[in-house]
Image (cartoon, helix red, strand yellow):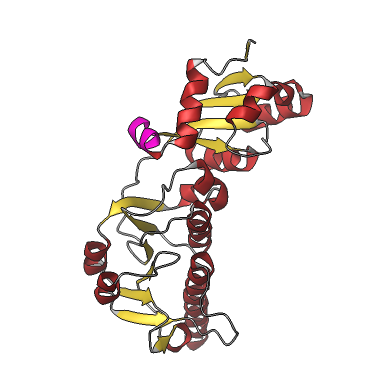
């Protein structure tokens, strides 16, 4: 199988654009997955990627070939081999894993009546791909169904965000470029905005029923308009010395307080029916 060695190859030019340009990703409807873990999750949920790009050393390793056979069987995607030096130059990480996948950005799945808008999150102007990916990872773990991103949010489908999410994208309905005030107005349950100025805390309120949490920009927090659009403003108690939490940490705390309350409610109901 031929080995690509030139950055002038059309595919290599495309990969470089996909790694660096959100506009190109949106225009082409494509993005990149870096590493075995992301590729495995993608395959388990959505099937075979369009193209695998592997380094020469990776492809020549017998164990890696066996892994690809186990992962894809007879449904192998197109495999493109590039020189090790070229892969280091185009990989979105400093230490390449040796394997990339070129994928079509999944279309937004139609919502079903079952579980519709039970648990959602609205994100306003989250700028850091690592923060966004971490929030998506926690959201998927907490069984959130829908994530709504404002127009000012960083690209949900950038390679950096995808790496930080560890495959969570493929278990969520991710809505980009949203009018969050409209989303909040149309949400069928309670919309909770997180604000350090709030008088009520997360642990003092009931999270029963459909809930949508709202989180704001890492530095500026939520806009006044979004705080006003929420049904309730809440804070997270912080008995220590710091004055604020990282956005991803705050989101995880809120998500799993909802999970905790739901589990406690279910356990209580089960005991009551005996």
**In front of the other: 16 or 135:** 16
Left or right of 24 on screen, residue 16: right
Where 258 falls versus 157 (above or below)? below
Residue at the top extreme of this rendering: 2
Per the image, is 271 magenta?
Answer: no
Q: What secondary structure predominates along the stretch shown in magenta?
A: helix
**In front of the other: 25 or 90:** 90
Where 182 falls versus 102 (above or below)? below
Residue at 50% over, 71% down? 250
Residue at 63% over, 38% down? 35
Residue at 38% over, 51% down? 174
Residue 166 seen in the figure: no
* Residue 64 percent location from the top left of the image: 73, 29
How many discs appear? 0
User: From the image, which quarter does the N terminus lie in?
Assistant: top right
Where 136 falls versus 45 (above or below)? below
* Residue 130 percent location from the top left of the image: 53, 54
**In front of the other: 270 or 142:** 142
Left or right of 57 on screen, residue 5: left
Quadrant hosting residue 72: top right
Residue at the front extreme of this rendering: 219
Residue at 48% over, 68% down? 251
* Residue 209 percent location from the top left of the image: 36, 76
Residue at the right extreme of this rendering: 62
Residue 12 seen in the figure: yes
Per the image, is 24 magenta?
Answer: yes
**In front of the other: 22 or 206:** 22
Magenta region: 23-29
* Residue 59 percent location from the top left of the image: 70, 22
């Amino acid at each position: 199988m031929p080995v690509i060695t030139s950055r002038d190859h059309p595919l290599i030019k495309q990969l470089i654009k996909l790694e660096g340009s959100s506009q190109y990703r949106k225009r082409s409807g494509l993005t990149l997955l870096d590493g075995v873990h992301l590729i495995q999750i993608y395959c388990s949920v959505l099937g075979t990627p369009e193209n695998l790009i592997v380094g020469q050393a990776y492809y020549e390793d017998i164990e890696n070939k066996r892994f690809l056979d186990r992962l894809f069987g007879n449904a192998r995607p197109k495999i493109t081999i590039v020189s090790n030096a070229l892969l280091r130059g185009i990989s979105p990480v400093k230490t390449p894993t040796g394997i990339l996948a070129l994928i079509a950005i999944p279309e937004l799945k139609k919502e079903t009546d079952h579980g519709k808008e039970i648990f959602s999150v609205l994100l306003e102007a989250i700028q850091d791909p690592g923060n966004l990916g971490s929030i998506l990872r926690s959201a998927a773990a907490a069984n959130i169904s829908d994530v709504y991103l404002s127009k000012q949010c960083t690209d949900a489908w950038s390679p950096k965000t995808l790496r930080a999410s560890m495959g969570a994208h493929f278990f969520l309905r991710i809505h980009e470029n949203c009018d969050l005030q409209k989303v909040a107005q149309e949400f069928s349950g309670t919309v909770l905005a997180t604000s350090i100025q709030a008088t009520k805390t997360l642990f003092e309120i009931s999270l029963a029923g459909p809930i949508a949490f709202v989180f704001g920009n890492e530095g500026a927090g939520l806009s006044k308009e979004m705080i006003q659009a929420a049904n309730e403003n809440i804070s997270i108690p912080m008995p220590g010395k710091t004055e604020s939490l990282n956005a991803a940490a705050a989101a995880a705390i809120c998500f799993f307080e909802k999970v905790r309350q739901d589990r406690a409610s279910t356990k209580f109901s089960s005991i009551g029916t005996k």
